[in-house]
Image (cartoon, grey):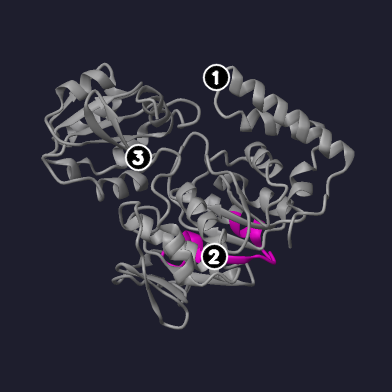
């Protein structure tokens, strides 16, 4: 349904105008995009604004611990083949940021919305989505987010009976458990590299059996569903068994998995896999992630990794040794203040790389690297790390606020 007719009441219009004004003031003050403060102001004036803005849009929600910003971008690109799209492309993924994004999409047909895992059920209630993509669940921000099993239960309860088509990763038992309450699920074999949060059955607590790519609980019979879409090497297999080549400018297997889920979502809205995948090739970087920037006459590739599963995927796509690697970790509010997750990351995968350590919590990271028998140097700032790094492109891996700090420093 197109969004050309105006669903907004006078109060809602006032809320949108006030929100945009607050966002503009925030931008002028150099405090970021202003989308969050703009959304907060708008929702204060009209608490039902998110639901009103979504009324005339085909809404697609994307949630996961890792990969949701990139997948949101890939889906948005694919769906532009079928009509105008509004999206929270910069990753403001809580209700205020989502409200801000939708307020800017009066002419859109589709809304492709990244949603923080904690807010998925509430945003789904407010926006009546046509489709929900669930990619993965793993440990993240232990001081803020619920334990993974609780998060899966929260999703399961919140999505029970949803009319949306749920596109869900068949390889993640927690996602399967969460999606199984929905009557209309499209299963995608997208893979699961990080398995440390999926050894106990989310249904009964029994031990999961994981022969090869399959999984099942020997105690209650909960098992991997049969997928209708699958990632197979460099191809997406559709429900008819046709193989469509994936050509991305984004690196790594994880992004191919994101493309497979995105192609399945696009098909829900009538966009053929070939068209969807061709359009995804346009995406070169996502909110600065994967960008290669010049700094002090050196090439730096910026990579975001926020939790153990994300770091594992990122290590798999960096250039081989002796490529220099800069690691930067903060523990501010947006990151989660608990850095104990560093101990869950397998840093032996960096053996042979010259490593340089930055960030507010560089000493926490240094202790972890010491235990992993890695050779590293602690640096005061990015300039010092770049000066000390041997020749060649430098891989820069950072968690959320550390990544934003680095982007500002390199002028990206």
| Residues at discs 1 and 3 in contact (Cβ within 8 Å) | no
Q: Secondary structure at mark 2?
A: helix
Q: Position of residue 192 (x, y in %)?
A: 36, 60
Sequence-wise, which precedes: disc 2 or disc 1? 1
Q: Secondary structure at mark 1?
A: loop
The residue carrying mark 1 is 30
Q: Where is residue 404, by image quadrant?
A: top left
Q: Where is residue 256, by image quadrant?
A: bottom left
Could you tell me how far apart the alpha carbons at marks 3 and 2 are, in whole angstroms? 26 Å
Could you tell me how far apart the alpha carbons at marks 1 and 3 are, in whole angstroms? 22 Å
User: Which residue is rendered at x = 25% and y = 19% of the image?
Assistant: 383
User: Is 364 situated left or right of 377 in this image?
Assistant: right
Could you tell me how far apart the alpha carbons at marks 2 and 1 are, in whole angstroms? 36 Å
Q: Is residue 175 part of the magenta span, yes or no?
A: yes
Please state the extent of the stretch shown in magenta in the rendering: 155-176
Mark drawn on residue 265: 2
Q: In front: mark 2 or mark 1?
A: 1
Q: In front: mark 3 or mark 2?
A: 3
Mark drawn on residue 71: none
Q: Secondary structure at mark 3?
A: loop
User: Which residue is rendered at x = 59% and y = 17% of the image?
Assistant: 29
Mark drawn on residue 291: 3
């Amino acid at each position: 349904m197109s969004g050309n007719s105006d669903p907004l009441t006078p109060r809602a219009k006032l809320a949108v105008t006030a929100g945009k004004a607050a966002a503009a003031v925030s931008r002028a003050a150099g405090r970021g995009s202003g989308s969050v403060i703009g959304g907060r102001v708008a929702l204060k004036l009209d608490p039902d604004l998110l639901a009103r803005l979504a009324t005339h849009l085909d809404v697609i929600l994307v949630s996961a611990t890792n990969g949701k910003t990139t997948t949101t971008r890939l889906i948005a690109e694919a769906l532009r083949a079928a009509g105008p799209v509004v999206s929270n492309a910069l990753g403001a993924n809580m209700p205020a940021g989502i409200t801000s994004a939708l307020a800017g999409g009066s002419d859109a047909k589709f809304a492709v919305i990244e949603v923080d895992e904690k807010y998925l059920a509430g945003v789904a209630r407010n926006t009546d989505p046509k489709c929900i993509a669930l990619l993965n669940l793993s440990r993240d921000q232990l001081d803020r987010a619920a334990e993974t099993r609780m998060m899966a239960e929260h999703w399961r309860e919140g999505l029970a009976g949803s009319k949306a088509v749920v596109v869900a990763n068949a390889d993640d038992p927690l996602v399967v458990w969460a999606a199984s309450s929905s009557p209309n699920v499209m299963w995608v074999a997208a893979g699961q590299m990080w398995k440390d949060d999926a050894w106990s059955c989310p249904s009964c607590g029994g031990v999961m059996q994981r022969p090869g790519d399959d999984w099942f609980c020997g105690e209650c019979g909960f098992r991997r569903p049969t997928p209708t879409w699958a990632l197979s090497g460099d191809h997406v297999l559709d429900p008819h068994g046709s193989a469509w080549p994936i050509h991305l400018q984004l690196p790594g297997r994880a992004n191919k998995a994101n493309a497979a889920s995105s192609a399945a979502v696009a098909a829900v809205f009538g966009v053929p896999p070939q068209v969807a995948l061709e359009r995804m090739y346009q995406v070169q970087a996502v909110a600065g992630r994967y960008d290669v920037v010049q700094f002090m006459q050196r090439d730096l590739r910026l990579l975001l990794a926020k939790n153990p599963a994300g770091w594992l995927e990122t290590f798999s796509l960096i250039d081989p040794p002796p490529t220099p690697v800069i690691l930067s970790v903060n523990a501010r509010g947006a990151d989660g203040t608990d850095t104990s997750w560093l101990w869950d990351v397998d840093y032996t995968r960096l053996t042979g790389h010259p490593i340089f350590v930055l960030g507010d919590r560089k000493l926490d990271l240094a202790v972890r690297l010491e235990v992993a028998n890695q050779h590293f140097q602690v640096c005061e700032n990015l300039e010092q790390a770049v000066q000390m790094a041997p020749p060649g492109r430098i891989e820069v891996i950072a968690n959320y606020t550390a990544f934003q700090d680095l982007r500002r420093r390199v002028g990206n």
